[in-house]
Amino acid sequence: MFTADQHRQLLRRNLSFLLFVMGSLFVFWKPLSGLISFSLTHDYGSHIILVAPASAYIIYLKRREIFSRLQSGLLAGSVLFLAGAILYWLSHRRALTFLQSGYESAEILAIVILWISGFVLAYGTKAFAKARFPLLFLLFLVPVPAFVLGEVVFLLQTGSAEVAYWLLRLLNVPVFKQGFMLQLPTLTVEVAEQCSGIRSSLALLITTLLVGEFVLRSAWRKSVLVASIVPILILKNGVRIVAVCLLTIYVDRGFLHGWLHTSGGIVFYVLGLVILIPILVALRNSEKRSQPDFSVVDVSRSESLTGGPR
């Protein structure tokens, strides 16, 4: 529980941070409004509009832990603020030539760094250490630059085509693969960029991070859970391709351009979650086994230390 003095101190710091954020919204309204528009018009950016509310809610849930020890974070906060300001200035001036077309992403990254610096200035480094997950979660506000997105999509395309090919072989379906083309007896399909499932893949990644934060404790188990996402993403995409192919050949040709093909990402997002559950359960059980059990007391040992039973 907070004392009256701690409540007043926290209220002042909350007000300072709120004014800092409100000021940044005013100063950076143009790139932030562009970010909202991007989120509403791009499939792979649809999660962005939910990131800040989710981050704020996690901080609210953990508020007693995060704000239990407040201190000054002037040095660390100032360094972060300077880094964010410089990055924004360079990206706004289009001075970072290596970014190619990723200047808007760099601007949003700079704003996120500035918000984190404001948090450190207001509450200190210890509060930041306890709130690092929801604060770093804000990085999902940054749109994936086109040159990075292209590499990720290519990886998902390649893996999905390969998985679909071998699944069809396992099902004894005649298939010939050439690049991203799959040739079946009465059907030829191309594993295009749209088949990469980038939207559902991002949703599954974010869900996994959130679940890992609340269910697991150790950092390495959280890392294993997140790393398991890569093969799961490729597997679910491969299953989606195979399902569409088989339904098109043996049920109805309309499945090739139907809902399952064009908008069925939610179905295979759920499939990814189902595959993830046993991995999560195994990691959670291993964590429980590794924790010491203090419920069993050595009675004979305690009696010898206290001089016997009374």
Image (cartoon, grey):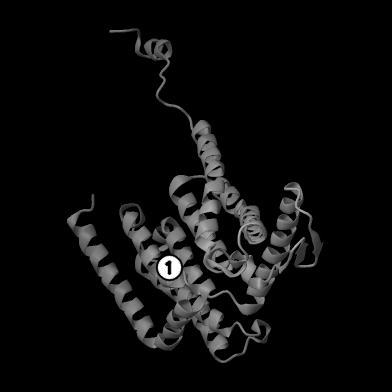
- Count up the numbered dots: 1
In front of the other: 285 or 243: 243
- Which residue appears at 46% of the width and 59% of the height? 133
In the rendered structure, the answer to whether residue 218 lies left or right of residue 298 reads right
In the image, 221: left or right of 303? right
| Residue in view at x 75 percent, y 52 percent | 173
Locate residue 247 relative to residue 292 in the image: left or right. Answer: right
Could you classify mark 1 by the number of other residues whose Cα lies within 10 Å: few (under 14), some (14-19), or many (20 or more)?
some
Q: Determine which quarter of the picture holds residue 87.
A: bottom right
Residue, disc 1: 51
Q: In the image, is residue 169 above or below residue 141? A: above
Residue at the bottom extreme, as displayed = 93
Residue 37 image position (x, y, % from top left): 44, 82
Q: Position of residue 48 (x, y in %)?
A: 46, 72
Q: Name the residue type under label 1.
A: Val
60 left or right, relative to 284 = left
> Residue drawn at (49%, 50%), measured in percent from left and top?
212
**Looking at the image, which is closer to me, 105 or 84?**
105
Q: Position of residue 65 (x, y in %)?
A: 34, 52
Q: Is residue 142 visible?
A: no
User: Under tag 1, what secondary structure?
Assistant: helix
79 vs 272, nearest the viewer? 272
Residue 116, horizontal then vertical, whole percent = 44, 70
Q: Work out which residue is located at the far left of the displayed protein and give it.
A: 4
Choose top left, top right, bottom left or bottom right for residue 95. Answer: bottom right
